[in-house]
């Protein structure tokens, strides 16, 4: 399976030994960002979108769970079903299953029913009768946006891993359960979108730590085997960036006040050992997952707002530019 | 600050918090401490990382607790929640006859409820807790909650499921079978036709068959759910909030705290995992100035590094203090960022030192 990530990079030769971010982002119109809770999936979603916008693509972020903090990352409030501009070239919106159902019913001439159905817990009963139907409503709407083409790139912030697999498997699951009708047609369309590398790819986000690495490897295998989706590079978030002096000889601290010297030494030691642990996890990730890695720096700053997102977008651009091109 | 009084005196401890903050590990350490204190303790985990599961002897889903041997005077047991078999057992318990039970267990709609209905896992975690507490002979039951976005699903879940089973749609679905309701069944038929058109007729038939089979059992389920809720609000039960100092985890932590408060349930302890150490007493701003004065040199780099970590520690401490203030007088326990994940009993014991012997002060490394 070595080819998956490499092949993707292969197609990106630009006459020179560099990957061009604009072409990287235009490989598929839909990029699904997946990863377990706490790995910075939402931050990466925002950074990817900003990077694409800076490369000249009109980008749309889609959020499918409430309170992800995406709005806040752009210095705005919570997102809604209506698109809003959140940065230059970037718009963002939510798609929840209830919202998508209402729209679906409206579009299919069942407006009269819609209020009654959503008020009575209809969706819960139907979703239980045919699990995955909520997810398919959401993905169906995403597919509609993808087809409409009013954005060059859609970046979807997927539900947390575990659930991401269920979410993306919903189409395949429904194809088994539902034999006729519009839901089946919808599921067929969604499955077609998900499994077409020219239209959709999944970017996994993880941390250089033991459990997140294990989970990324497992999620990748499940997404490939069970969903058949194309995997783009894996994004590793939170790597300590290099800093001068970490490996300097002890004499460097000879003239520093003793109290400072002790603290400087302890902090340097901490960073070095953390750095080593991170490198070890990167090796484990490379051993377990044959995908190119894009590394993002750990941010010490307490805030996560537009300046930090810009910084990460720039780091992402650099990381893509530095990807090795398969010979 | 220590959590020893909790593990010594309480009968039930619920660990809540968002995903990836170390709830499972914390729950396991608490149960282990209970065993050390001589109690018969069990930890119920939802989705443990594989190596921890192995360490606890949880190689596969088992609906019964496994005993873990170790150097404690009490007993330590562990169980990985199997939502479906827990639910199956409830159905068997409340079905008036074995035939009815089997009819439900075979139904596809039921299989979906037990596997996929949101909130079912939460409900079954609480059900299992209740069962172990009431019938398992355990003096301490520690439960890890599912990493749910819908933070307090596990409190709401039993009621939600019974509401679902009581749903008006459910009534409508039942109507065609009741001759005396023929008069109003036009609306029902329209609805069923619409649903069938959208998801297919078999799906609707499965649902109708389920609700018919389930009829008469709602009452038993509701009573059981009420008893589970009662146990959760009992003074013998303690809720423990687990978080990390990351902004998003703390935000979820605040949300949990608010929801628990709404439900009239106090947070009895706050555990913050993965705190960065503080290396200097000097403020980050001051260190940053010292770094700028030496910008471009190796020493400048070292000051920059010290300033970075000091700033991080300051921010983490301030954020944690705010949450701690909110859940006062719950004790605050800080666990430092450990070099590796916990995946054996020694690791759990090591972690236990922070939960049970810690002085509650922010970690400052020697010499700082």
Image: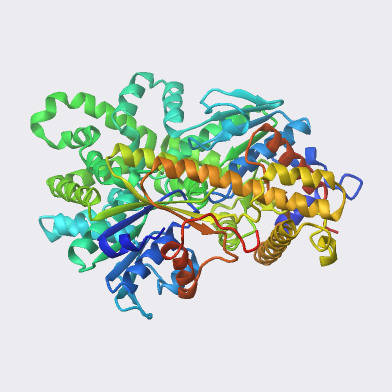
Residue at screen point 65% across, 51% down: A231
Q: Nearer the viewer, residue A56 or B136?
A: B136
Whether residue A40 is visible, yes or no, is no
- In the image as oriented, which residue stretches furthest toward the top? A112
Q: How is the image coloured?
A: rainbow
Instruction: Give residue A72's position: percent from left, percent from top.
Output: 58, 32
Whether residue A80 is visible, yes or no, is yes
Q: Say which quadrant the C terminus of chain B sits in.
A: bottom right
Answer with left or right where residue B44 lies relative to residue A218: left
Q: Nearer the viewer, residue A176 or B364?
A: B364
- In the image as oriented, which residue stretches furthest toward the left? B180
Answer with left or right where residue B6 lies relative to residue A298: left
Instruction: Give residue B302's position: percent from left, percent from top.
Output: 78, 55
Instruction: Give residue A276's position: percent from left, percent from top.
Output: 71, 65
Quarter assignment of residue A307 = top right
Q: Nearer the viewer, residue B7 or A29?
A: B7
Answer with left or right where residue B134 lies relative to residue B38: left
Q: Nearer the viewer, residue B364 or B152?
A: B364
Residue at screen point 59% across, 53% down: A228
Q: Say which quadrant the N terminus of chain B sits in.
A: bottom left
Residue at screen point 26% across, 44% down: B161
Instruction: Give residue B236's position: percent from left, percent from top.
Output: 23, 56
Q: Is residue B206 above or below residue B84?
A: above
Q: Is residue A267 above or below residue B56?
A: above
Answer with left or right where residue B135 lies relative to residue B323: left
The total of numbered circles placed on residues is 0
């Amino acid at each position: 399976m070595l080819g998956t990530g490499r092949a993707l990079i292969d197609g990106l030769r630009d006459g020179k030994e560099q990957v061009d971010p604009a072409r990287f982002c235009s490989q598929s119109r839909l990029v699904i960002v997946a990863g377990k809770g706490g790995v910075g999936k939402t931050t990466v979603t925002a950074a990817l979108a900003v990077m694409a916008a800076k490369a000249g693509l009109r980008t749309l972020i889609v959020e499918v769970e409430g309170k992800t903090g995406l709005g806040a990352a752009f210095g705005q409030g919570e997102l809604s079903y209506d698109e809003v501009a959140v940065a230059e070239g970037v718009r963002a919106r939510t798609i929840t299953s209830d919202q998508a159902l209402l729209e679906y019913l409206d579009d299919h001439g069942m407006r009269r029913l819609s209020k009654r159905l959503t008020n009575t817990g209809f969706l819960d009963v139907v979703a239980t009768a045919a699990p995955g139907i909520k997810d398919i409503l959401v993905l169906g709407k995403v597919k509609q946006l993808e087809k409409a083409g009013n954005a060059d790139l859609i970046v979807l912030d997927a539900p947390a891993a575990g659930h991401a697999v269920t979410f993306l498997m919903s189409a395949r699951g429904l194809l088994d359960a539902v034999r006729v009708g519009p839901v089946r047609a919808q599921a067929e369309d969604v499955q077609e979108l998900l499994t077409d590398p020219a239209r959709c790819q999944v970017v996994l986000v993880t941390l250089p730590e033991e459990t997140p690495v294990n989970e990324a490897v497992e999620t990748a295998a499940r997404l490939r085997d069970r969903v058949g989706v194309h995997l783009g590079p894996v994004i590793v978030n939170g790597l300590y960036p290099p800093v001068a002096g970490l490996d300097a000889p002890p004499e460097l601290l000879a003239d520093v006040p003793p109290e400072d010297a002790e603290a400087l030494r302890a902090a340097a030691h901490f960073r070095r050992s953390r750095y080593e642990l991170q490198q070890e996890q990167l090796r484990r990730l490379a051993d377990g997952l044959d995908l190119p890695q894009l590394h993002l720096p750990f941010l010490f700053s307490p805030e996560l707002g537009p300046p930090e997102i810009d910084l990460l977008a720039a780091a992402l651009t650099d990381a893509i530019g530095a990807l090795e091109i398969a010979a | 600050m220590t959590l020893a009084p909790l593990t010594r005196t309480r009968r039930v401890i619920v660990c809540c918090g968002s995903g990836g903050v170390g709830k499972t590990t914390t729950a396991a350490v608490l149960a282990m401490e209970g065993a050390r204190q001589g109690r018969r303790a069990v930890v119920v985990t939802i989705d443990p990382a594989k190596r921890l599961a192995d360490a606890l002897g949880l190689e596969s889903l088992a609906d019964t607790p496994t005993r873990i041997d170790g150097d404690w005077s009490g007993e330590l047991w562990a169980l990985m929640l199997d939502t479906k078999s827990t639910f199956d057992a409830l159905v068997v318990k409340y079905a008036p006859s074995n035939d009815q039970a089997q009819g439900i267990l075979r139904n596809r709609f039921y299989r979906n409820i037990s596997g996929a209905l949101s909130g079912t896992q939460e409900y079954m975690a609480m059900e299992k807790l209740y069962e172990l507490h009431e019938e398992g002979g355990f003096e301490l039951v520690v439960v890890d909650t599912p990493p749910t976005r819908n933070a307090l699903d596990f409190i709401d879940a039993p009621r939600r499921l019974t509401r679902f089973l009581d749903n008006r749609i459910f009534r409508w679905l039942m109507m065609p079978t009741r001759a005396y309701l023929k008069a109003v069944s036009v609306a029902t038929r329209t609805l069923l036709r619409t649903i069938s058109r959208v998801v297919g007729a078999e799906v609707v038939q499965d649902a109708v068959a389920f609700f018919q089979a389930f009829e008469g059992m709602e009452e038993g389920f509701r009573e059981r759910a009420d008893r589970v809720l009662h146990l959760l609000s009992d003074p013998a039960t303690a809720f423990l909030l687990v978080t990390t100092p990351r902004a998003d985890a703390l935000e979820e932590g605040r949300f949990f705290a608010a929801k628990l408060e709404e439900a009239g349930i106090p947070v009895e302890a706050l555990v913050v995992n993965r705190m960065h150490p503080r290396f200097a007493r000097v403020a980050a701003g001051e260190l940053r100035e010292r770094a700028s004065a030496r910008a471009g040199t190796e020493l400048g780099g070292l000051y920059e590094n010290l300033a970075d970590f000091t700033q991080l520690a300051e921010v983490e401490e301030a954020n944690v203090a705010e949450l701690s203030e909110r859940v006062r007088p719950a004790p605050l326990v800080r666990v430092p960022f450990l070099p590796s994940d916990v995946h054996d009993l020694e690791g759990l014991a090591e972690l236990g030192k922070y939960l049970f012997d810690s002085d509650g002060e922010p970690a400052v490394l020697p010499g700082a």
